[in-house]
Amino acid sequence: IEAEGFEPEVLAGATETLKRTKLVTVDAGEERLGESTAPSCVNLLLESGFQLRRVFLRRGIFLFSSALFDGAL
């Protein structure tokens, strides 16, 4: 998800889609007047049953997987 700072809103509106989703990557940079959307995105996905698998801090990219995904990362 790359939504120019609106990643939390996209995730909040995708609850039914997330129930069928195996992997999610989120580009959660400092796009809201210098503030990162990462905390909101991480919390929303953790609350939706996803696990944080990888973090690429330089780019602000986060990889999550759900219980639907049983492959190795």
Image: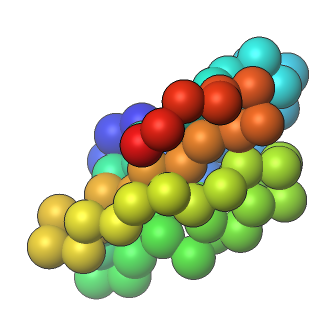
In the drawing, does residue 58 fall left or right of residue 31? left
Whether residue 32 appears in this view of the structure is no
**Residue nearer the viewer, 39 or 62:** 62
Depth check: 63 or 28 in front?
Answer: 63
The location of residue 6, given as percent across then percent down, is: 48, 49
Image quadrant occupied by the C terminus: top left
Q: Is residue 32 above or below residue 48?
A: below
Q: Is residue 15 visible?
A: yes
* Residue found at the very far front of the displayed protein: 72
The coloring applied to the image is: rainbow
Q: Residue at x 31, y 57 (%)?
A: 61
Q: Position of residue 51 (x, y in %)?
A: 66, 56
Q: In this rendering, is residue 50 above or below 69?
A: below
Residue 3: percent from the left, percent from the top? 38, 40
Question: On the rendered image, what quadrant is the N terminus found in?
Answer: top left
Residue visible at 57% across and 61% down? 52
Residue 33 rendering spot, x and y as whole percentages: 31, 77
Residue at point 84% right, 59% down?
47
